[in-house]
Amino acid sequence: MKKSRVLFASLAGSVIEWYDFYLYGTATGLVFTTLFFPNHDPAISLLLAFVTFGAGYAARPIGSILFGHMGDRIGRKAALMFTLIGMGGSSMLIGVLPTYAQVGLAAPAILVVLRLIQGISLGGEWGGAILLATESAPKGVRGLYGSIPQLGVPIGLVAGSFSLTLISSLTTDAQFLSWGWRIPFLLSGVLIGLAIWVRSGIEETPEFKAQKDSGDLAKVPIIETLKHDWRSVLQVIGLKIGDGFFNVFIMSYVLVFTTLYFGYSQDSALTGLTIGCATMLITIPVIGYISDFIDRKIIYFGGLTLLFVLAIPYFTMIGRGVGWFYMMQAVVLGVIWGAIFSTQGTLFSELFPAKVRYTGLSVGYQVAAAIAGFGPLIWTAMAESYGPSPLVFGGFMMAGLAISLALCILSPHFSRRKEKDQTLKPHKLDLN
């Protein structure tokens, strides 16, 4: 089986899953506050809408257990096929969902259920995509391979945001709120179909096949994980929590923050986000490749340190004009967070043995993501009380990053713990 097809399969599915997930996030501020959570107080409408946004994050640990079990017992490929079906089906149903004006409270209730399905599906997608790439990687380029599925986040986010922006520009305000916003959600059905077709043509990863052939499969992966590898799960949660809050802000809440509190136009906010994501497209594979030569822990620690140092300056500068906003998005999101995220999947996966790797990797990561996913609720309340204060918002981010930095300092030197025979010399990249 060609390595290039495996990488494409891990990336294609990841892009589409994140397209659907972030499409919802963009639609939250643009559409759902009006059509599904109408209220005379805009702040309350926004708060209610972000509750459903956070619900998707809260559901991700459920998906990590469900699909982790499937991935560690049946196979990585099987689990990834079901995550696509769950995400695609729920997104298409959102596209045909009646509004509050049409069916009353049933509309937001069904929307929450569909958002939960999205979260459950994504909870199993991320870990599976990482393992599909890293467990199929030749020795010496595991970091590069593990970085490729991470490209799905910036590509999916930009695609989701751009699709709504494009439809908005081609329709009147009335048309967009009536039917235009539904088109990107319905389009996800076609994209999911293509991703399923791509993934159906790949084989199981060599590491899982070897594990299955040995007969040493975990009977109940989540139980074995919590029994034998609970320290690694807690380590992943702690290492992720710091950059997790920053990530949710600079890739989602920033659209609301800059338009509502700094008066930037929606186009300016989306441009800043796009600049950061475009920079990540370069940072992620480059740093992924470098991490095969330099200890991934060093890169990770360096990225967290820079985020800590720049937390207050970031919130100070983004309010001083769109030029500063664009520059900070490029540096903080595109370069620094992109470097952290590039190494994250490979770094975390190396903490777990193959028999519970899907479960351990997914549970740790998604629990941290679930906690960070409720950041918008906290920040909305903070902004109502303190405004867009750099000290308040920057201090909040620094608190989370301090936890991750402490764990990073105290953690063992584990960047190649599972791949001791990997040489540090450059390898020819073989995609055949």
Image (cartoon, grey):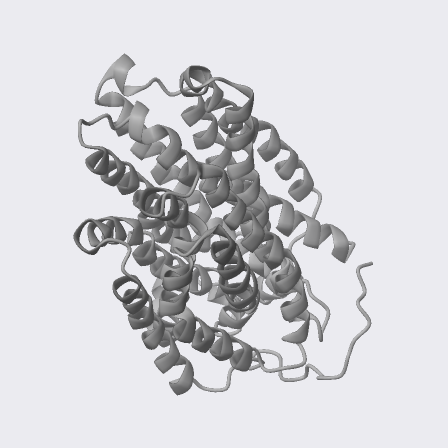
Q: Percent from the top left, x then y, of residue 189?
A: 55, 28
- For the N terminus, the image quarter is bottom right
Q: Camera-side residue: 388 or 220?
A: 388
Rendered view: 314 above or below 43: below
Q: Percent from the top left, x then y, of residue 210?
A: 63, 65
Residue that extends furthest to the front in the rendered view of this protein: 320
Is 161 left or right of 49, judged from the image as shown? right
For image coordinates 47% across by 55% down, the residue present is: 325
Q: Camera-side residue: 354 or 318?
A: 318
Is residue 135 at all visible to an observer of this figure? no
Rendered view: 340 above or below 175: below
Q: Percent from the top left, x then y, of residue 31?
A: 37, 28
For image coordinates 51% across by 54% down, the residue present is: 323
Q: Camera-side residue: 24 or 215?
A: 24
Rendered view: 263 above or below 243: above
Q: Percent from the top left, x then y, of residue 103?
A: 26, 15
Is residue 205 at all visible to an observer of this figure? yes
- For the C terminus, the image quarter is bottom right
Rendered view: 316 above or below 178: below
Q: Camera-side residue: 299 or 261?
A: 261
